[in-house]
């Protein structure tokens, strides 16, 4: 994993040790079930199993797949997440990233454990000839345990955020004011940054900043002073007592990111659904590199130093699209496909046209529209990557947000469309 935090080696070792213990104490003993040697295993809930001179069928196999191992899997997941959160108490700015690292390690743990169970099950049913029987699919088991894992990770992030920002108490208008100021600042290229200005005219307060794009929003000086008191902004009165200068400090941008994650508007449910879709075990397994690249871009987007990484966000999204298209090409093997991995549009066109005959006219039109949409997103990515080069228009945070979100939409729609087409 690139760009690991200092916590990663410790957590990787801990998860690895947990797997080794469960494998040694609970899983591997089943390998000898048909050998005549008595089986004696006890899970973390104290449930003990004793078998001797019986076949691996009926009750023993039902117990094998009926939840005997899951308490230990859940225990590892919750303990590792809790320990990760505890380790990060002194480094709250790292907690989300470190929890994501732990989540990746635990997903590997879950997949490895269930695949080993499936291997043992196949071996025991084959009675020395494992290839004579079909291996039991375990995607359902992995999906269920991964869903539990994701819920615990999300809960840990929310608890850590609540603890980090517990001392800040703002009214809704003050939160909205901070969001407005932060987004105005990010709507201006970093090398053209300037403070926002606040002035009062006839008892009305107004804000001025290029990032407001011609608007002059109203504000209350008392709310600005509250934000300054919480050390979220720097507020200075100029020599002209009617004008105040406002700068967002790093803590303010961090709190802004927290607020954005907490704001649950109806339209965000759609985005949440798309993120759930591409975060599912099925999608992550099918498009592992594409998901990893996009997830890295999204993490950078909401990080405190996002504006230092605008081109990196573009690179991640471009590579996510390339990896996504590459999986589709390898899966469906369309004829005469462009072999250049960088030619994402051509490769996607080959995949979609290969299946277009199975669609109704409406669905066919939709897929052709997806091609145009792909090209538009690709152009956004290219602007994101090359926008900082000499002679090009400067990038702003809004460009990065657009690229990350539209890459998400694209992968979601293409995967859903092809899922309908291909049985």
Image (cartoon, rainbow, N blue to C red):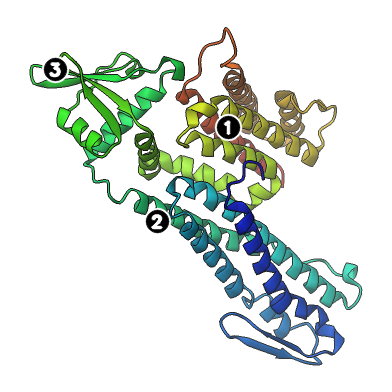
**Mark 2 lies on residue:** 159
Circle 3/circle 2 CB separation < 8 Å = no
Residue 179: x percent and y percent?
32, 32
335 or 74, which lies in front? 74
- Badge 1 crowding class, 10 Å Cα cut-off, few under 14, some 14 to 19, many 20 or more, is many
Q: Residue furthest left?
A: 202
Q: Is residue 343 visible?
A: yes
Circle 1/circle 2 CB separation < 8 Å = no
Which residue is painted at 85% across and 27% down in the image? 336
Q: Earlier in the sequence, mark 3 or mark 2?
A: 2
- Badge 3 crowding class, 10 Å Cα cut-off, few under 14, some 14 to 19, many 20 or more, is few
**Mark 3 lies on residue:** 241
Q: Tell us which disc is closer to us: 1 or 3.
A: 3
Describe the element under mark 2 as helix, strand or loop. helix
384 or 406, which lies in front? 384
Residue 256: x percent and y percent?
36, 37
Q: Is residue 325 left or right of residue 393?
A: right
Residues under labels 3 and 2: Cα distance?
A: 42 Å
Residue 24: x percent and y percent?
73, 75
For the N terminus, the quadrant is: top right
Circle 1/circle 3 CB separation < 8 Å = no
Q: Is residue 231 above or below residue 350?
A: below
The quadrant where residue 25 appears: bottom right
In the drawing, what numbered circle is on residue 407?
Answer: 1
Residues under labels 1 and 3: Cα distance?
A: 47 Å
């Amino acid at each position: 994993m690139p760009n690991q935090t200092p916590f990663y080696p410790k957590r990787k070792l801990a998860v690895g040790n947990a797997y080794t213990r469960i494998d040694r104490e609970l899983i591997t003993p089943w390998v000898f079930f048909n050998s005549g040697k008595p089986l004696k295993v006890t899970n973390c809930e104290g449930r003990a199993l004793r078998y001797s001179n019986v076949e691996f069928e009926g009750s023993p196999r039902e117990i094998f797949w009926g939840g005997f191992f899951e308490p230990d899997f859940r225990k590892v997941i919750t303990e590792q997440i809790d320990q990760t959160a505890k380790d990060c108490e002194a480094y709250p700015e790292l907690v989300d990233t470190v929890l994501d690292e732990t989540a990746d390690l635990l997903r590997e743990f879950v997949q490895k454990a269930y695949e080993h169970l499936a291997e043992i099950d196949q071996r025991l049913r084959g009675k020395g000839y494992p290839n004579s029987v079909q291996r039991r699919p375990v995607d359902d088991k992995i999906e269920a345990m991964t869903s539990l894992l994701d819920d615990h990770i999300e809960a840990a992030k929310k608890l850590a955020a609540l603890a980090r920002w517990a001392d800040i108490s703002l009214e809704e208008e003050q939160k909205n004011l901070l969001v407005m100021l932060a987004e105005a600042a990010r709507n201006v290229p970093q090398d053209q940054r300037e403070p926002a200005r606040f002035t009062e005219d006839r008892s009305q307060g107004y804000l001025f900043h290029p990032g407001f794009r011609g608007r002059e929003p109203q504000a209350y000086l008392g709310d600005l002073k509250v934000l300054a008191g919480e050390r979220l902004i720097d507020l200075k009165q100029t020599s002209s007592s009617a004008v105040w200068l406002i700068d967002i400090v790093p803590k303010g941008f961090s709190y802004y990111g927290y607020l954005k994650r907490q704001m649950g508007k109806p339209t965000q449910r759609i985005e949440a659904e798309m993120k759930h879709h591409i975060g599912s075990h099925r999608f992550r397994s099918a498009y592992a590199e594409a998901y990893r690249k996009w997830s890295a871009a999204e993490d950078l987007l909401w990080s405190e130093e996002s504006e230092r990484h605008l081109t990196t966000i573009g690179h991640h999204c471009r590579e996510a699209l390339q990896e996504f298209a590459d999986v589709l090409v390898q899966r469906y093997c369309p004829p005469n496909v462009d072999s250049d991995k960088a030619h994402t549009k051509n490769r996607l066109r080959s995949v979609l046209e290969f299946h277009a005959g199975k669609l109704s006219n409406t669905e066919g039109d939709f897929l052709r529209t997806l091609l145009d949409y792909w090209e538009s997103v690709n152009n956004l990515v290219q602007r994101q990557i090359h926008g900082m080069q000499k002679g090009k228009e400067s990038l702003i945070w809004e460009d990065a947000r657009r690229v990350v979100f539209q890459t998400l939409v694209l992968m979601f729609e293409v995967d859903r469309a092809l899922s309908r087409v291909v049985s």
